[in-house]
Every structure is written in structure tokens, then in C-alpha cells.
Image (tube, grey):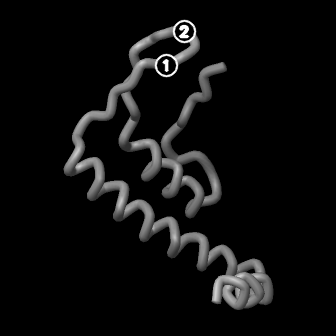
């Protein structure tokens, strides 16, 4: 079945593929929101430097909205 889905997806035109990706992201984002609602704040210790970090739980939604718009809506800065 997965093989058939792969070939069906490959047969889509670029616009249809984008619609499929957006729908899958919508479903994933819904699950993310459910997870965050149950879990709350997510913290971890970064393994290389040992710094304490907190996950930006809004980042997936910001990234998704930017992807739908075709440009960065959230003014996300990349730390290098």
C-alpha cells in the first residue's frame, strides 16, 4: 500500500504536492498542539556545552505559517 501511495504522490503536479504537504503539516501541527497541551514546557540539557534549553513551542506553527505564505512571517533569527 505504501508503495502505491508513493507512486500516486509522485504522479501529482507541484501544486497538488504542495497541497498534500500542507495538509500533512496541518495534521502534524494538531498533534503537536495536543502534545504541548499535555506536556507543557519542554526543557533539556544540551549535550555538547551542557547548557539548559527550553523548546520554543511556537516555532513549528511559525514555520508552517511562513511555509504557507512563502516567506518568513515570524522574523525568525538563526543562531550560528
- Residue 69 in percent (x, y) is at 57, 60
Residue occupying image coordinates x 52% and y 17%:
47
Q: Secondary structure at mark 1?
A: loop
Would you place residue 32 above or below residue 20 in this image?
Answer: above
Residue to which mark 1 is pinned: 46
Residue 68 falls left or right of residue 6: left
In the image: residue 74, left or right of residue 2: left
Toward which corner of the image does residue 22 lie, by quadrant? bottom right
Residue 78 location in percent, x, y?
A: 61, 28
**Residues at discs 2 and 1 in contact (Cβ within 8 Å):** yes
Q: Residue at x 48, y 10 (%)?
A: 50
* Marks 2/1: CA–CA distance: 6 Å
Q: Residue at x 45, y 42 (%)?
A: 59
Residue situated in front as seen by the camera: 20 or 38: 38
Indicate left or right for 53 with 40 as reference.
Answer: right
Q: Position of residue 3 (x, y in %)?
A: 72, 85
Identify residue for label 2: 49
In the rendered view, tell whether residue 68 sits above or below residue 7.
above
- Mark 1 closeness class: few <14, some 14–19, many ≥20 residues within 10 Å: few
Amino acid at each position: 500500500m505504501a508503495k502505491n501511495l508513493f507512486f500516486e504522490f509522485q504522479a501529482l503536479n507541484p501544486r497538488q504536492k504542495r497541497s498534500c504537504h500542507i495538509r500533512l503539516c496541518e495534521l502534524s501541527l494538531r498533534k503537536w498542539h495536543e502534545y504541548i497541551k499535555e506536556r507543557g514546557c519542554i526543557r533539556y540539557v544540551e549535550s555538547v556545552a551542557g547548557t539548559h534549553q527550553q523548546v520554543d513551542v511556537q516555532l513549528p506553527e511559525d514555520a508552517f505559517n511562513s511555509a504557507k505564505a512563502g516567506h518568513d512571517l515570524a522574523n525568525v533569527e538563526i543562531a550560528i
